[in-house]
Image (spheres, rainbow, N blue to C red):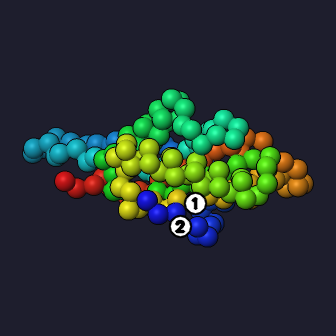
Amino acid sequence: MTLKNGRWRPLFAGFAALSAGFAAIGTLASCAMGPKPAPAIASNCSSTNFPIYFAKGSDVLSDQARAAIRAGADMVRTCQVREVDIFGLTSADGPAAVDLALSKRRAANVAQALAAAGLPEPLFDVEGLGASTARTAKGGPAMLQRKTLVVIQVASTPQTS
């Protein structure tokens, strides 16, 4: 797995705005005359995002984190995955170099777990951002930055076998 440092994109800024829902399945109305048409199946493939939280100073995935990773992978299992962005973050508790190294380890551990859950590793963009996002608009420390953000982008249609 390769860390692609420096590829900070506006995607991260819009992380909270992404939808994690599924599309509904619709059917065609049948005609009174003639054979019943086959139902039209709407795709249930939708891009998703989720955080994976860590204990302070740790890069170890908890059982809850592993379950969340498996659930995220399961949500897109039948979809055409286009890209998986993994952003490791830290709080601003320590020196910048230490925070950056920790964020890279967190992102790498989440990426390994996503690959083990069946997501296509060549599509991963793994970045450690350190404490670069650990400040509020007023410059104070942001809470709960001990996490990795996962953004899975998929095509709107299921993968073909």
From the viewer's side, name the closer residue of 158 and 32: 158
Q: Residue at x 28, y 42 (%)?
A: 27
Q: Residue furthest bottom?
A: 6
The answer, for residue 149, to whether it is visible in the render is: no
Q: Residue at x 38, y 57 (%)?
A: 121
User: Horizontally, is 79 left or right of 129 in the view?
Assistant: left
Label 1 – label 2 distance at C-alpha: 6 Å
Query: Label 1 neighbourhood size at 10 Å, few (<14), some (14-19), many (20+)?
Result: many
Query: Label 2 neighbourhood size at 10 Å, few (<14), some (14-19), many (20+)?
Result: few
User: Horizontally, is 115 left or right of 49 in the view?
Assistant: left
Residue 51: assigned label:
none
**Residue 129 coordinates in the image, percent (x, y):** 66, 59
**Quarter of the image where one finds residue 61:** top right
Residue marked by disc 1: 127
Q: Residue at x 65, y 55 (%)?
A: 101
From the viewer's side, name the closer residue of 27 and 124: 124
User: Horizontally, is 79 left or right of 5 in the view?
Assistant: left
**Residue 37 coordinates in the image, percent (x, y):** 16, 46
How many numbered discs, if any?
Answer: 2
Residue marked by disc 2: 4
From the viewer's side, name the closer residue of 89 and 38: 89
Identity, as a three-letter code, of the amino acid under mark 2 = Lys
Q: Residue furthest left?
A: 34
Local SS, label 1: strand
**Residue 30 coordinates in the image, percent (x, y):** 21, 42
**Quarter of the image where one finds residue 39:** top left
Closer to the N terminus: mark 1 or mark 2? 2
